[in-house]
Image (cartoon, grey):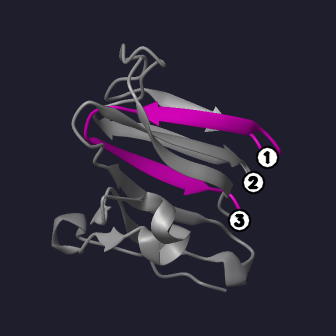
Amino acid sequence: METDAIFIRTPETSWTPASSIYGESVLHDGKEIVFVKQLTDRLKQGKGVAYLIRFLPPEGKMIRTVAVARSDEHVYILEGGHCYRNGEQRLFPGDYVLNPEGHSHAALVNIETVALVICTGATDEVKKISVIELK
């Protein structure tokens, strides 16, 4: 049984290009647009994962993510936020979203955004990540 606390100084932890996880779908014109900082991965112990995710949408465009939650996914917006299709911001720093296990969901991001994501088990099944034009 694990009894020690886990401590991570996140400012000193490097961002990892998400292309190492999701492939070329998170590249735009050859440039990385999504990054992650893995905080914990306790899946082997029957627990969940926690990570920071950073979206850097290209100027005048949005990053669209479509996924299905494979466990309860808690998302807390730290910086930036999500938007509607027209670009109007709908989630702001401090906002929280729960995507329950089995829930299909999507996110649109048109400004630099950082979120804390905690999954109670496996991470989402990401169906598609794409860059789209603002409408």
Which circle's residue, 2 or 3, is located before the other in the chain? Answer: 2
Residue closest to the eye, 59 or 101: 59
Q: Which residue is mark 3?
A: 122
How many other residues sit within 10 Å of disc 3, few (<14), some (14-19) or many (≥20)? many
Q: Which residue carries the number 1 mark?
A: 101
Report which residue position mark 2 lands on. Answer: 71
The residues tagged by marks 2 and 3 sit, at their Cα atoms, a distance apart of: 6 Å
Q: Earlier in the sequence, mark 1 or mark 3?
A: 1
- Image quadrant holding the C terminus, namely top left
Q: Is residue 45 magenta?
A: no
Residue 99 can be seen in this image: no
Q: Count neighbours of disc 2 (C-alpha within 10 A) and say few if under 14, some if 14 to 19, many if 20 or more.
A: many
Residue 81 position, x and y percent, is: 35, 30
Q: Which x, y percent locates residue 19?
A: 44, 71
Q: Residue at x 45, y 77 (%)?
A: 20
Q: Callout 1: 10 Å neighbours few (<14), some, many (20+)?
A: some
Tag 2: amino acid: Ser
Element under disc 3: loop
Q: Is residue 9 above or below residue 89?
A: below
Work out how far the residue at label 1 is from the one at label 3, CA to CA, in angstroms: 10 Å
Report the number of numbered marks.
Answer: 3
Residue 100: name its quadrant. Answer: top right
Percent of width and height locating residue 101: 79, 46
* Dot placed on the residue nearer the N-terminal end, 2 or 1: 2
Q: Give the extent of the magenta segment.
A: 100-121
Q: Are marks 1 and 3 in contact (CB under 8 Å)?
A: no
Q: Give the alpha-carbon distance from disc 2 to disc 1, as whole Å.
A: 4 Å
| Residue drawn at 28 percent across, 48 percent down | 56
- Measured as percent of width and height from the top left, residue 129 is found at 54, 51
Residue furthest left in the image: 12
